[in-house]
Amino acid sequence: MEASSPDISVVIPSLDEVSALPRLLETLSRQAGVSLEVVVADGGSRDGTLAACHSAATRLGFPVVAVEAPPGRGRQMNRGARPCRAPDLLFLHADSAIEDDLLLARARERMDAERRLRGTQRIAGHFGLRFVRSEPGESGGYYFFEAKTRLNRPGCLNGDQGFWLRRDYFEELGGFDESLPYMEDARLAARVFETGAWITLPGRLGTSARRFETEGLRRRQALNALLRNCDAIGLDGFFEAAAGAYREQSRVESLRIGPFLALAHRTAVAEGLRRAVGHWHRTGRYVASNAWQLAFAIDCARSRRSGYPPGEGPTRWLDRFDRWAGPLCGSAPAGAVAALLTALCFYGALGFSLAGEARKRRMKDEG
């Protein structure tokens, strides 16, 4: 490898990010202790994103390569990785925010130390998140989800946290899944759990909370949980049909979870009663495997009251759960109970949503 090759190649997918991406490039240009190259993989922006990137790179004297890619975050990041010259890849979202000028240098030291300690290159790193909110204030919900991003457990990792791994390991994993316009981060994270290990990198990475503030934090996280569950149980038809629900959602602000619940129900029953029962059986096992989050929520509430930053407080309840209840959650009875409770919650929420939609239509007709 040439001596002038960078230490880290930062790959950023973009689509109409003219307001966010130049700010990220400016903060990356201030990173000390490492040499970087940035590859922006644009999916067809129409707001001048690429022109703004070139202007920012010229002003900063910072190496930025722009490549065009078919829209879809997985496709864009795979395309962006191709021209990268560094041995380490870092995938960031365009709305990421970095405050510490030594963030990447410290992260690189941690990655190198873990590789030496474990004697393997099959390690991927991620940062804990800090939500950048338009109206900061006390919020147990944001605290819980920020703390959760510090963990290295299945279901806790997403692309907002930044994915850092060796290029050859990334290629061994087959890159990001391109079959869907979403879930590419969760599927890559799952393959790392199967073949290697995740570590939490020092420092925190900021990310915009605009989607949560617009759509509602709990609604968005409920939808994320539904997506992860459908992926885990193999309900592939849901994803094939969800594009229409996403297009409908883009026309409104507050997230409407009802259409997605109805879509999941229709997809499951369309495959026949036997397969629908099988999906609910697998859903029960999936939900039971995530029951630890209830104990972690108690820890987060206690840590928040005690003034700990998210993710840095004691985890006594989670430790007890892992020791005593965790093994039981993998049993068939636990899965059956979880399936029943989840079904009651699912159809209760679906019924409530359908009733609300009917009420709105009735009021509209009367008006």
Image (cartoon, grey):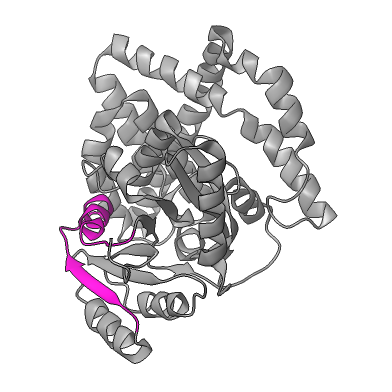
In this orientation, does residue 343 appear? Answer: yes
Does 52 appear above or below 240?
below
Position in image of residue 284 (x %, y %): 49, 19
Q: Quadrant of residue 234?
A: top left
Q: Residue at x 58, y 13 (%)?
A: 334
Does 44 appear above or below 107?
below
Q: Residue at x 24, y 60 (%)?
A: 80
Asked if residue 73 lies in the magenta stretch, the reply is yes
Left or right for 288, reference 169:
right
Please state the total of marks drawn on the protein image.
Answer: 0
Task: Work out whether residue 28 or residue 116 is closer to the camera in this orientation and state it.
Answer: 116
Query: Which residue lies most toward the bottom here?
Result: 59
In this orientation, does residue 255 appear? Answer: no
Position in image of residue 135 (x %, y %): 60, 72
Q: Quadrant of residue 280?
A: top left
Position in image of residue 246 (x %, y %): 29, 50
Q: Quadrant of residue 136?
A: bottom right
Q: Residue at x 54, y 49 (%)?
A: 218
Left or right for 42, reference 220:
left
Position in image of residue 355 (x %, y %): 43, 39
Q: Split into 4 quadrants, where in the image is the C terminus?
A: bottom left
Q: Which residues are magenta?
A: 62-86
Asked if residue 77 lies in the magenta stretch, the reply is yes
Q: Residue at x 76, y 26 (%)?
A: 320
Task: Work out whether residue 80 or residue 324 is closer to the camera in this orientation and state it.
Answer: 80
Q: Split into 4 quadrants, where in the image is the N terminus?
A: bottom left
Task: Work out whether residue 223 or residue 120 is closer to the camera in this orientation and state it.
Answer: 120
Does 235 appear above or below 250?
above
